[in-house]
């Protein structure tokens, strides 16, 4: 949207609804909260906890995670290196569309590579991407092992498992860090909600 | 979501927000309005007109069209037959995610094949997919030719152009038909808005 009233009128006449219009309607600014961290670190739990809290406060959000992406949009992708890259690329592009639509968009994937997360940041647009490092030591995640995946990786039944047989590139300057080994779930969610408020993404 | 209050509480406790929650928050039911028709039939114009009208009435909607999909999510796809199929498949899956998030999702692509549109209907879920046939005769579209594409297709500069050198499979039982050769833009938009109201997708 241009700052020029004339151009603005022209755009409106053509029926285009822009970010300011959506913000006024939804009382929030669309953005991407990108949760990255090891398997078992709590990304999806935090995302769904934040979604519930935002909903209770009257905000529209949506969680993109393995449950709704892997069996639909990305069901054609394998776990090869190339397809994992494409998996994250598509998720970054879809998250950008959701943010453009005005939603608080919560993304919960391991997303171990910096390059993939930077591409997602670029797609969302600077200032709309909140990289959130769910920072839990490997041994803690491995002790939790809620899906038994670490055991399988140690037994050689899963190849290229992040943290065991494939690298995890930790964020260097994440917008938010959440050490869930030290914070309760409620406190983790509260930290993210406070960030959204303090930075003007949501308001009363 | 289960109808059982106990299961419902369990789901809520886990932090999952379901369709009923989103409908209550946004005062609308997420759905996919899938506009199909020849190039130049007016799909995108109607979609943006409907978006403006819905916005003015306080409803959250979003248009998926070539402008925001081809250069992002689907920029890896060519115009080969296989990639055109994949283009529509992904759009159908993304539209389903948007509808699941509670938005009135407006999709404007030629989408010439019944199979592609049926797959999109299946992804969205029955009862949430509003196939809308923008029904304009080929010669009218060719006379309009706003982007000069028909001329290029006639000159053999574009291969497999829908209506000229590739088939268009018209919908057999679309939820809505819009003969834009006979209706004004305002009337076309009004017809779709009335359908959304009459079928309980939007309310005051």
Image: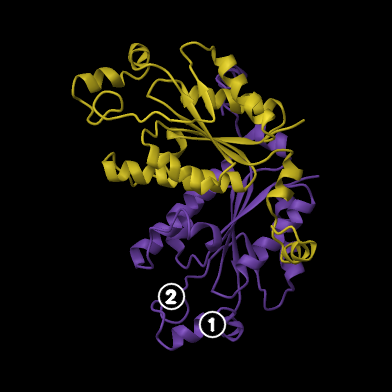
Chain colours: A yellow, B purple
Q: Residue furthest front?
A: A173
**Residue nearest the observer in this picture, A153 or A134:** A134
- Subunit that carries the residue with mark 2: B
Q: Quadrant of residue A126?
A: top right
- Residue A150: give x, y in percent of width and height: 29, 19
Q: Residue furthest left?
A: A156
Q: In the image, are marks 1 and 2 on the same chain?
A: yes
**Residue nearest the observer in this picture, A131 or A102:** A131
Residue occupying image coordinates x 44% and y 21%: A135
Pointer 2 residue: B167
Q: Is residue A153 left or right of residue A171?
A: left
Mark 1 burial class by Cα count in 10 Å: few <14, some 14-19, many 20+: few
Residue occupying image coordinates x 75% and y 44%: A25
Q: Is residue A182 left or right of residue B60?
A: left
Q: Secondary structure at mark 1?
A: loop
Q: Secondary structure at mark 2?
A: loop
**Residue mark closest to the camera, 1 vs 2:** 1
Residue occupying image coordinates x 56% and y 78%: B147
**Which badge, 1 or 2, comes first in the chain's sequence?**
1
Q: Quadrant of the N terminus of chain B?
A: top right
- Residue B65: give x, y in percent of width and height: 55, 60
B124 in relation to A201, above or below: below
- Residue B10: give x, y in percent of width and height: 56, 17
Q: Could you give the CA–CA distance between mark 1 and mark 2, rounded to whole angstroms?
A: 19 Å
Q: Quadrant of residue A24?
A: top right
């Amino acid at each position: 949207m241009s700052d020029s009233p004339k151009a603005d009128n022209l755009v409106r006449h053509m029926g285009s609804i822009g970010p300011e219009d959506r913000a006024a309607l939804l009382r929030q600014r669309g953005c991407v909260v990108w949760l990255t961290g090891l398997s078992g670190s709590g990304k999806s739990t935090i995302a769904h906890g934040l979604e519930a809290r935002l909903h209770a406060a009257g905000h529209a959000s949506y969680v993109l995670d393995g449950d709704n992406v892997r069996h639909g949009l990305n069901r054609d992708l394998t776990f090869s290196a190339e397809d994992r890259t494409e998996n994250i690329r598509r998720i970054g592009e879809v998250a950008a569309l959701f943010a453009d639509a005005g939603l608080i968009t919560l993304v919960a994937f391991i997303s171990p590579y910096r390059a993939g997360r930077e591409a997602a940041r670029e797609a969302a647009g600077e200032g709309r991407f909140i990289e959130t490092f769910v920072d839990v030591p490997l041994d803690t995640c491995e002790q939790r092992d809620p899906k038994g995946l670490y055991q399988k990786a140690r037994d050689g039944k899963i190849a290229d498992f992040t943290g065991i047989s494939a690298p995890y590139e930790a964020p260097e300057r994440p917008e938010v860090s959440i050490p869930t080994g030290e914070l309760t779930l409620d406190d983790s969610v509260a930290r993210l909600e406070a960030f959204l408020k303090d930075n003007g993404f949501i308001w009363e």
